Image (cartoon, rainbow, N blue to C red):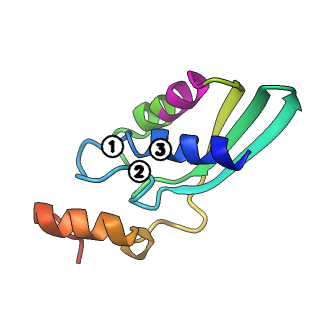
Amino acid sequence: MKELEEKIIEKLKEIYDPEIPIDIYSMGLIYKINLEEIEKDKINCKIDMTLTSPACPVAGDLVKEVESSILAMDKIEKMKVKLTFKPPWNKDMISEEGQEIMEMEGAFIK
């Protein structure tokens, strides 16, 4: 399952908030990935994620993009995103890689 989780992370790194120049995983918006094997080669996936703000104008689009991207992967039978704001997102959740990208893009959040 570790290999599948790594593939899911790679997929999540292809999804961007249109206003921020880094992917949602590096941004720290993904809190948890839970995989449950329901039978051989059939996995249910649940992802707990947040947004930079509860008023994010692309919230519905980001959730749908995460769900459809992961559901399209081999072995994923069901996919559910749980949107949460506990704890609320803050700039300290951005990965080191994400911070470097934002600095290079001149978009680092102070």
In the visual, does 57 lie left or right of 64? left
**Nearest-to-viewer mark from 3 and 2:** 3
Q: Give the structural element (helix, strand or loop) at label 3.
A: helix
Residue identifier under label 1: 16
Vertical side of 32 occupied by 99: above or below: below
Q: How packed is label 1: few (under 14 Cα within 10 Å), some, or many (20 or more)?
A: some
Residue extending farthest front: 3
Residue identifier under label 3: 10
Q: Give the structural element (helix, strand or loop) at label 2.
A: loop
Tag 2 or tag 3, which sits nearer the N-term? 3
Q: Which residues are magenta?
A: 66-73
> What is the CA distance from the residue labelled 3 to the residue labelled 2?
11 Å
For the C terminus, the image quarter is bottom left
Q: Is residue 60 magenta?
A: no
Vertical side of 41 occupied by 22: above or below: below
In the visual, does 49 lie left or right of 43? left
Residue 14 found in image quarter: top left
Tell me which secondary structure the magenta stretch mostly adopts: helix
